[in-house]
Amino acid sequence: MTAPNLFITYVADAPKAAAFYADLFELEPTLTTPGYIVFRVAPGVDFAVWSGVSDASVPQTPRTSEVCVAVPAGEDVDAIFARWIAKGVTVVAEPHDEPFGRTFVISDPDGNLIRVAPVD
C-alpha cells in the first residue's frame, strides 16, 4: 500500500519561507532550488515549500489545511508556544484545550496555518 510521503505548502517566496521553517523546526533543507525547497521531517517523509505558479500561493487565498506538529504525550505545548513566540511568529490561536488535548495555531509569512497538538 502507498502512503503520502511528501507534503507541499505553497508560498510566495520559497527561500523566505524555507528560512522561516528552518528556524521554526530547527531543520536544514535537504534540497534547495530557487522556488522549491525540501526538508526531511522523518525517514521517507518530506515537507516542502514551493513558490510555483498557483492560485494557492497568494496570501489572499483562504487556507483550508494546516501543517500539524504532533508532539508526544506529556510534551509541554505551552513551552513550545513560548519558544516560538520568542522567534516572532504570528499567533492565530493561543494555547487552549480541545477534546484532543492542548493546542495552539500560528501562521507562516504566507498565512499557512501551523498547529501544535498532542499525538492522537
Image: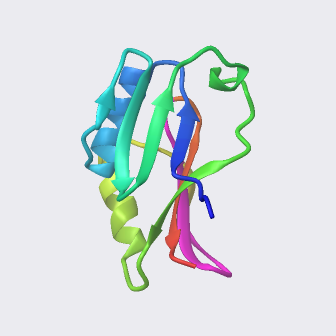
Place of residue 95 in the rendered image (x, y in percent of width and height, measured from the top left): 52, 67
Task: From this view, report whether residue 70 is shown above or below residue 44.
Answer: below
Task: From this view, report whether residue 58 is shown above or below residue 86.
Answer: above
Q: Nearer the viewer, residue 36 or 4?
A: 4
Place of residue 39 in the rendered image (x, y in percent of width and height, measured from the top left): 36, 42
Place of residue 36 in the rendered image (x, y in percent of width and height, measured from the top left): 44, 24
User: In the image, what residue occupies the spot 65% across and 20% down?
Assistant: 58
User: In the image, what residue occupies the spot 59% across and 59% down?
Assistant: 3
Is residue 57 highlighted in magenta? Answer: no
Please indicate whether residue 85 sits to the left or right of residue 116 in the image: left
Main SS, magenta region, reads: strand
User: In the image, what residue occupies the spot 33% across and 69% down?
Assistant: 79
Q: Is residue 52 visible from the viewing direction of this image?
A: yes
The magenta-colored residue range is 95-109
Quarter containing the C terminus? bottom right
Place of residue 66 in the rendered image (x, y in percent of width and height, measured from the top left): 62, 50
Is residue 107 highlighted in magenta? Answer: yes
Quadrant of residue 17 within the rendered picture: top left
Quarter containing the N terminus? bottom right
User: In the image, what residue occupies the spot 43% across and 84% down?
Assistant: 73
Q: Is residue 95 visible from the viewing direction of this image?
A: no
Q: Nearer the viewer, residue 40 or 51?
A: 40
* Outermost front residue: 1
Task: From this view, report whether residue 35 is shown above or below residue 44.
Answer: above
